Image (cartoon, rainbow, N blue to C red):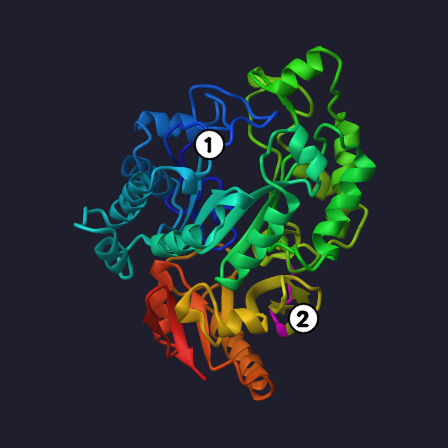
Amino acid sequence: MLLPTTKEEVRKPTKTLAGVTPIAVMCAPRPCSHGVCRYCPVFDVPQSYTPASPPVMRAQRHNYDSYGQIESRLKAFEVMHHPTDKIEIIILGGTFLDYPIEYQYEFIKGIYDALNGKKSSSLEKAKKLNEKEKHRCVALCIETRPDFARDEDIKRALDFGCTRMEIGVQILDDEIYKHINRAHTVQDVVDATKNLKDAGFKIGYHIMPGLPKSNPEKDLKLFKRVFDDERFKPDQLKIYPTTVMQNTGLEKDFKAGRFKPYTLEQTQDLLIKMFKVIPEYCRTMRVMRQFAPDHIVAGTTRISLRKDIEEILRDKKIPIKEIRFREIGFAQKFSNKINNKTKLKVLEYAASEGKECFIQAVNKDNVLFGLLRLRIPGKESLETPVIPELKNAALIRELHVYGQSINIGEENKELGQHKGLGKELMKKAEEIIAKESKSNKEIKKIAIISGVGVRDYYRKLGYELDKFYMIKNI
């Protein structure tokens, strides 16, 4: 790794351009309980990964110990001169919520202990300590399957301090699910999406164009359904075009002539069409898996595909609504003259039997400075929620101010964070909820799903911790 040449230089600045410092931590290898998906490689590493994957190699150096992985990444970011106050944790490697429960708790506690720089006697004490430590967990993401977002999974994830769930949707087609041995249904996706949203989580979908029994036209049609059908509508996406990997059922199909992956041109054309569809409330986190070419048998290998596509879209001035394309941190890479005067814009849409209010701070060019996701659950979820603390509660599922991440309390001389936008977005959300409560008597309070390290911020705004959520009565 090349180190910064000066004290001020930040190595790989794009890693923290979205306002947080992301750290991926990988759990130990364990077979999925449902078996193996047809496209999934099987090595002596966590499911769906290969021995040459960077997070796998980092995890192996620490024998998959969560404490060691976090400690190592913190040091690496500090050496690269990145801020490490606001940490976003992403847990990788198989279906974490399907692991033995004792292992899950030990793994999560190791994460907080490493952030705190000391070991606590319990997870609860480690979380409490992290509210005021230097390296605060402001968001925690767990990857899971649609059939592992049950009530007991949700309650456990909340206990971990989880704020976002990414679910492996791949494609909305039961016939394809059966063929690739996913062992879940489209209805499981519907149920998981609603249950997670009604618990306040931010939702990400993993999408895989090019699977067996699909084609570009079908992929695009089903991708449009993700946003046209009220039962879905995720907040985030990761798009992973299908590649034929070593040690997979798909490799056997390919060699027998039963499967042919998309060409680079087909993949690029489809992705451009998909980007045109993505609405302004959704963020595309990633395009392409980072597999080493040695483990790819056939299919697109270009890791820079997202960059190539974005250049085409910008050169052709094709209007793209999705979040990452518009956020201030990335917009500054393409323009030195960005208007810093923002206004709040509210988009309302129906989703999963509730109402979503997507509040965003944008300038006249629709460059995004910050956002808030507010959910008004349906009547049944307001009256008898799975989580008792959410009875009669409107939900704030996300508050995020974009721009280069800076340390807590540090003055920002540029555009983006620490300019009061978070408070403006919160004030607008509270105004909407107050108005909503006048016509909907079921709404009596506001509940925020908060990363452990952000609780103090909400306390200053009048919220108090009630088990898993920051709560304020209306």
The answer to whether 294 is drawn above or below residue 465 in the figure is above
Q: Is residue 248 left or right of residue 158?
A: right
Q: Which SS type dominates the magenta stretch?
A: loop
The amino acid at mark 1 is Ser
Q: Nearer the viewer, residue 195 or 13?
A: 195
Q: Is residue 129 left or right of residue 58?
A: left
Q: Is residue 175 magenta?
A: no
Q: Nearer the viewer, residue 7 or 220?
A: 220
- Span of residues in magenta: 336-344
Which residue is drawn at the image coordinates 79% and 32% (left, top)?
Answer: 215
Instruction: Tell me the tag on residue 248.
Output: none
Mark 1 nearby-residue class (10 Å; few <14, some 14–19, many ≥20): few
Q: Is residue 180 left or right of residue 156?
A: right
Instruction: Tell me the tag on residue 33.
Output: 1
> x, y (%) of residue 228?
75, 56
The amino acid at mark 2 is Glu
Q: Which residue is mark 2?
A: 348
The answer to whether 472 is drawn above or below residue 40 in the figure is below
The answer to whether 209 is drawn above or below residue 111 in the figure is above
